Amino acid sequence: MSDSALKLDKTIFEKEIHCVSIRVPSKCANKFMKNFGGHLLDMKKFKPIVEDNIIKNNNYRLLILNQKYKKLDLSDLPKDKRDFIFQVQQEEQSADVELFKCEPYNIKVGYDSMPAEEVFRKILPESIKEVPSSYEQVGHIAHINLKDDVLPYKHIIGQVIIDKSPSVKTVVNKVGNISTQFREFHMEVLAGENDLNVDMNEHGFRYKFDYSKVYWNSRLGTEHQRLPKLFNKDDIVADMFAGVGPFAIPASKNAKCAVHANDLNPNSYEYLKQNVKLNKVEKLVTCYNMDGREFIKHLVEKEIKFTQVIMNLPASAVEFIDVFKGLFTAEYTPLPVIHCYTFIRNDQEESSESLAKQSVRDVLGVNDITFTSVYNVRNIAPKKDMYCVSFKLPVNHKRKLELTDTQESSDSKKLKPQ
């Protein structure tokens, strides 16, 4: 069945669950809840103790047993639970024959009470073994990566995600891989509003941007918080690939340190400036729109003695470490600590940590490097992880600063400080 032919008919999800209920005194409801743990109704959005809608007595409540219990005489209920009911019945000594009576209790369930994964299982062909189960949320946008076998059902999948996630207004699917120098990716709106302008909050910081024009990864939220905690007010941070500011802004706001934040993407640069103002850190953050290598050389030329460097470009950041080879004179102290993000594919016996360290040694051409941390940020795919390699730049003063090295782009030579 194609996506165009597949319509979301919510009536196909309607069904009735047959349960058994026990009428208990309202005052004893909590006592039953504690004693019957694991034996009560277990369904999302449905409570196991409800008002008595059969005889409508406010002094009574209906205790709904787990769906697996079907017999009104409670013979399938464990003996200790039956004994507990009898014990409470004796304590109450009520003459009301309706009290502690078992009644059939039917629950009507449908689309609105079903989780998204259960809906997908019902509407997608059995041949699809792996149904969509997760997505990245960026503000009001849900970003999913659909596999080829579910693409014919992409629009219906998008609609289900919106229905099941109140904070999601737009669902997009990535089309192709991130291949541009600005780390943008092509996306298709599958359902909801055609609005990719994000206004979001992460760890108390506000960010605005057009999701289609910049790079943002919500799965790095914990890392956006972890790394800036390593800095203090005496640090001067150089953020080489700052994006819209997820490292620069927390560093300046929390550590109270000066940050020089750079990004080659003109759109990221504009949103970076906007977010700096939104978070009121204009006095601490200076923004640049430059090639990463030229940015570092510019800071050194201007005698801005940065102490920490953030290189969040995991696909190729290691290659940019070459800018530091022979960059500093012997008088430049202390040399900065570099925090370089990188992807490590490991199908070898050697540890991923060792491979991450060696990738840095290979670029710098030296083995005597002091690594302060090799941190596993997250798993990307089988045998592929993202690492943050932190190390102290080794002393190497064989040459002075040269301003003619290879750039990311010839169009990025013009400096645009904020």
Image: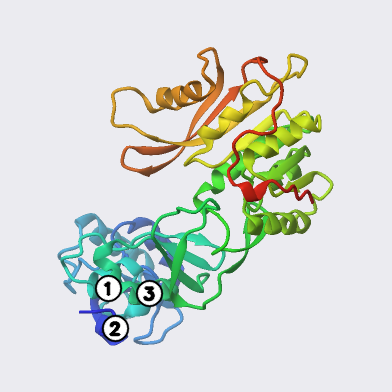
Kindly identify the amino acid type of the residue bearing the numbered disc 3: Val
Q: Is residue 262 left or right of residue 180?
A: right
Q: Is residue 375 left or right of residue 95?
A: right
Residue at left 78%, top 57%?
Answer: 277
Q: Is residue 306 visible?
A: yes
Question: Circle 3 is placed at which residue position?
Answer: 160
Does residue 378 lie above or below 51 as drawn? above
Q: CA distance from mark 2 to mark 3?
A: 15 Å
Q: CA distance from mark 3 to mark 1?
A: 15 Å
In front of the other: 49 or 122: 122
Question: Circle 2 is placed at which residue position?
Answer: 4
Kindly identify the amino acid type of the residue bearing the numbered disc 1: Pro
Question: Circle 1 is placed at which residue position?
Answer: 152
Q: CA distance from mark 1 to mark 2?
A: 8 Å
Kindly identify the amino acid type of the residue bearing the numbered disc 2: Ser
How would you rate the neighbour count of disc 1 (Cα within 10 Å): few for under 14, some for 14-19, many for 20 or more? some
Q: Position of residue 90 (x, y in %)?
A: 32, 65
Tell me which corner region of the image, top left, top right, bottom left or bottom right, holds residue 222.
top right
Are the residues flagged by discs 2 and 3 in contact, CB closer than 8 Å? Answer: no
Tell me which corner region of the image, top left, top right, bottom left or bottom right, holds residue 61.
bottom left
SS of the residue at dot 2?
A: loop
In front of the other: 63 or 188: 188
Residue at left 67%, top 18%?
Answer: 399
Does residue 251 lie above or below 92 as drawn? above
Q: Earlier in the sequence, mark 3 or mark 1?
A: 1
Tell me the quadrant of the picture where the N terminus can be found: bottom left
How would you rate the neighbour count of disc 2 (Cα within 10 Å): few for under 14, some for 14-19, many for 20 or more? few
Q: Position of residue 151 (x, y in %)?
A: 29, 69
Q: Is residue 61 visible?
A: no
Q: Position of residue 124 (x, y in %)?
A: 23, 72
